[in-house]
Image (tube, rainbow, N blue to C red):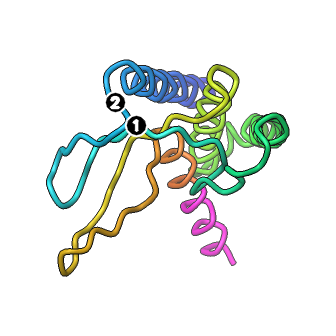
Amino acid sequence: MKNKTQAQIAVFALLLTADQLSKWWIEQQIPFFHMTVIDGFFNIVRAHNFGVAFSLLADWGHQWRTALLLGVTIGIAAVVSVWWWRERAAPGNISWLLILILTGAVGNIWDRLQFGYVVDFIDWYVVIGGEAYHWPAFNIADACISVSVLLLLLTSLKKN
């Protein structure tokens, strides 16, 4: 148990550091337009997400939106922390998925506390018939949350 817990805390710290350093670099180096990495597939952008996933709620009043999103995200982080603490020694991968969700939540909470928005910068897209179809910009924290929630759902479906 001790080694698994230590490894999960180390992964949490590593990914959180990567998330925050990447966002800091984007804020310092990338103007508000894109930098092409792989033409027709991948860009680095600088986007400020004032809402939640896919910029939902971004049009709400700033003061209420920020307080609501912080409250909800901190609440989710607290629930996931307790869940992780209880599952950390259990066999299987649930505790690893929970630590990834927690990493993403803390990374985005930190952004909202620091900036009032979340810094997004990964822009994946495909070009079909000359038309570019973009996935909404995201960051390392978002990737941690999305991948782990998807795997958590698949794991729970597999058990049933």
> Residue 151 location, x and y as percent?
54, 60
> Residue 31 location, x and y as percent?
34, 30
Q: Main secondary structure of the magenta part?
A: helix
- In the figure, residue 90 lies in which quadrant? top right
Q: Which residue lies under the disc numbered 1?
A: 46
Q: Residue at x 70, y 23 (%)?
A: 113
Q: Residue at x 55, y 28 (%)?
A: 12
The kind of secondary structure element at disc 1 is strand
CA–CA distance in space, label 1 to label 2: 7 Å
Q: Residue at x 54, y 54 (%)?
A: 146
Q: Nearer the viewer, residue 34 or 53?
A: 34
- In the image, residue 21 sits, relative to residue 57, either above or below, namely above
Q: Nearer the viewer, residue 126 or 72?
A: 126
- In the figure, residue 82 lies in which quadrant? top right
Query: Which stretch is magenta?
Result: 149-160
Mark 1 and mark 2 residues within 8 Å of each other at the beta carbon: yes
Q: Is residue 156 magenta?
A: yes
Quadrant position of the N terminus in the picture = top right
Q: Residue at x 51, y 34 (%)?
A: 119
The kind of secondary structure element at disc 2 is loop
Disc 1 residue type (three-letter): Arg
Disc 2 residue type (three-letter): Pro
> Residue 40 location, x and y as percent?
18, 61
- In the image, residue 125 sits, relative to residue 159, either above or below, namely above
Q: Residues within 10 Å of mark 2 (few under 14, many from 20)?
A: few
> Residue 106 location, x and y as percent?
65, 30
